[in-house]
Amino acid sequence: MDTLPHLPPHPSRRIRFDRTLLAILVVSVVVRVLASLYLGNEVQNLPGTADQLSYHTLAMRVLEGHGFSFGEPWWPATRAGAPTAHWSYLYTFYLVLVYAVFGAVPLVARILQSLIVGLLLPWLAYEIGWKLFGRSAGLAVAGLTAIYAYFVYYAAALMTESFYLVSVLAVLHFSLGLAEASHDGAPSSLRRWRAIALGLSLAAAVLLRQVFLPVIPFLYAWILWTTRGRVSLRTTLTDLGLSALLLLASLAPFTLYNSVRFGHLVGLNTNAGFAFFWANHPIHGTSFQPILSDDAPSYGSLIPEELRGLDESLLDRALLLRGLEFVRDDPLRYMRLSLSRIPAYFMFWPSRTSSAMSNFFRVASFGLLWPVMLVGMAIALVRKPMRHPGTVLLLGFAIVYTSIHLLSWALIRYRLPVDAVLLIFAGLGVTELASALLRWWRNVKLRDRRPDPWGLTLE
């Protein structure tokens, strides 16, 4: 197998390209800070950001010494004062830290988040795009990521989305890096450091969203496939074992904490059962509703009466079993229901049932760029010089991650990690289309040249 390309830029072009990347990063930070200023110091239930109310409230409860609990009955079915593990511990700790240092000022948390994400997200996108398709494509990817409307909007929301996007791209970046370092002659220390970086980025992704867990077997399988014949299987398994050990060590304290609070073994978060139960409830029939309409029963009322006395963790398990029973009792309906989630997941057109803000962000991001994403994917798959094991990694991740949500709960904001990956192909598509347009223009200029009577060539 060919080694993964990682060629340095030509020295004469390095300064110019670095200045371009710096300009992109500045733009990325500025637009996100402006979004933070627009959302301001109030924590409101704006379109797609209802969760920020929960994170803000939970952080305040922790600061006040009440631990991870709410002072009143809370979503999804948590009683007042009862322990909850429904929400990301890592993101809650971020808010707790910011509030402890600067006071309970949501605007400060928004701005700090915008600074961190505004720098890291385009930079990681640039690094991956450059590794796979060259530096020009990397710059195009960084530019698109910097101004992608959904990313700008969620960078200012007090939710897991933005940090999660950074962690997902970090996982892909370090997966590529570990495979790249696994060739003959590479020092073992380089592989170890990249395995550590991969483990830490995996831990961040899972601590922000446990839905990332099913993706990890695919990532490890890709690394094993990519490194075969270049280093020994034992070496690769050692590297993967190190990353897995770091991941498990990061999750263990939260599992122990949950188990002590609930009085029985509880994993990282208590949300998978709720999501699977509600997403596959017979109320949907064979047509999935991403958010139940106002005239439909509430989510809480769908929970069976005999289960409502359970604590949050036991209720989560019981609802997962009920959801699996829905699948077992009518697998054909489940299949049709899962297929009906495709439009909800990939929706890019405006809708009468959506707010003007939702329609704008939907059309101004995925709605504008999905054709270029498809062009880039086609080029990466068809053109031989572009074929690369990394293409398999990106497309495989997009397929696996999409499948997880089509089989459970599909919302547009759940698709954002896939958008971040597809933007890498969009960067390739933009650069290839720009090159084709430039070649066409040069040909037009050449055809327009006419020789003068004196034998000179004039335009």
Image (cartoon, rainbow, N blue to C red):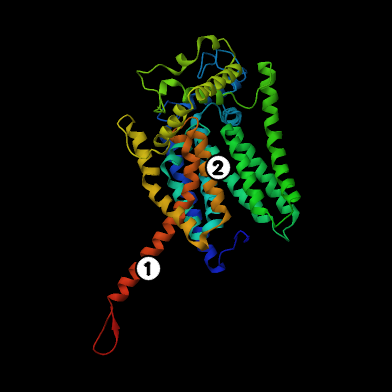
Q: Residue 449, percent across and down? A: 28, 78
Q: Residue 234, percent across and down? A: 76, 49
Residue 166, numbered label: 2
Residue furthest out toward the left: 453
Q: Nearer the viewer, residue 308 or 161?
A: 308
Judge whether 175 appears above or below 88 on screen.
below
Tell me the distance, in whole angstroms, between the alpha carbons under discs 2 and 1. Answer: 36 Å
Q: Is residue 132 visible?
A: yes
In primary-sequence order, the first of circles 2 and 1 is 2
The amino acid marked with disc number 1 is Arg
The residue located at (33%, 72%) in the rendering is 443
Q: Residue 216, percent across and down? A: 62, 40
Q: How many marks?
A: 2
Q: Quickly name the residue at label 1.
A: 439
Q: Is residue 305 left or right of residue 242?
A: left
Q: Are marks 2 and 1 in contact (CB under 8 Å)?
A: no
The amino acid marked with disc number 2 is Val
